[in-house]
Image (spheres, grey):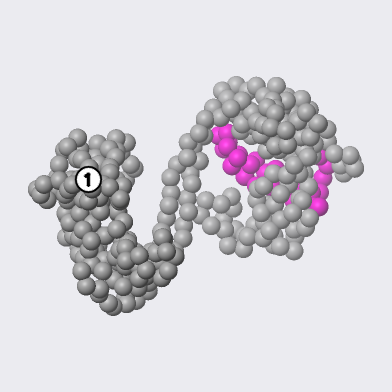
Amino acid sequence: MPPISGTPEALSAPLVVEFPFTRSLGPVQSAFLTGLRERTVLGVRTADGRVLVPPVEYDPVTAEEIRDLVEVGTTGTVTTWAWNPAPRRGQPLDTPFAWVLVRLDGADTALLHALDAAGPDAVHTGMRVRVRWAGERTGAITDIACFEPYEGGADGETAPRSDEPREPVPHSGEFADPVTGITAPARLDYTYTPGRAQSRYLAALAERRTVGERCPSCRKVYVPPRGACPTCGVATRDQVEVGPRGTVTTFCIVNIKAKNLDIEVPYVYAHIALDGADLALHARIGGIPYDRVRMGLRVEPVWRDGSRYPDHYRPTGEPDADYDSYKELI
């Protein structure tokens, strides 16, 4: 097909990647998080006597399994810090605070958390701090609401603390109703700005056309375009319209329903080599029972009113493509 031209204005859009991460806990992490619920901070002692807080299940030096739990203090010393002037969604405090590494009394490593301080001038390496517990605790790192400056002795004593750090106390790690699993939300907020190649690609999709870019060296056409040939490493500039029909090269059957996705399972997600393209893109296959989708199936895009991209691809009714015509794109 002939090359096309035209440079759309730069595009940008906010993008959020978010999902809940669920994991089970081993005996060490279970004891640590359950302990926080009970206002107790636990560490683990290694074979050479070091006390690690937060605890880990394997020695980072020897890789040996470690289970020797100990209780450490709820007061400690700031080893390093950074000021956060603009807290973001989900951070420990909604007012400016300091991120600090705190070596709790009796520990040999530092714990990362937030310090509630009046300003950066109120924070310094070596300052004494203590845990401020959350009002409601569930067995999570957020049971420590934050740290706060502390001028008293260890663990709430009013007298000045001794020059010697508190000694860790052996602990069984046993609690009633232990925490055995956690669900941690993972979220990434950022602004995405596509480059020249993808801006043209998106602008064409809004017109219900699909364009790729041809490499001036190997002459392959890439869809979606990347701005450079992944094989030759040279810039691609020639815009080439492809499709709209294509061939299913390979596919999978999805049996787990995604949250907030209004598609009934099972459904098929496939790699589709559009006519004239040398790279397969991925899309959902509809208009055919999931167990009748096959390699070589000829498909075409289906657009919804007002949509900027195809909703799915459906069979065209043509005979299946010969395997040799798409085997290099699998």
The number of callouts visible is: 1
Residue receiving disc 1: 323
Residue 194 visible at all = no
Q: Is residue 65 above or below residue 19?
A: above
Magenta segment boundaries in residue numbering? 126-154
Indicate the position of residue 304 as horizontal and vertical percent values. 18, 57
142 within the magenta span: yes
Mark 1: few/some/many CA within 10 Å (<14, 14-19, 20+): few
Q: What residue type is labelled 1?
A: Tyr
* 126 vs 251, nearest the viewer: 251
Indicate the position of residue 324 as horizontal and vertical percent values. 23, 48
Single out the residue that lies furthest toward the right. Answer: 163
* 42 vs 302, nearest the viewer: 302
Residue drawn 25% across the image and 73% down it: 3
The quarter holding residue 192 reads bottom left
Q: Is residue 264 above or below residue 90?
A: above
Q: For numbered disc 1, what is the local secondary structure?
A: helix
Quadrant assignment for the N terminus: bottom left
Judged left or right of residue 8, residue 325 is left
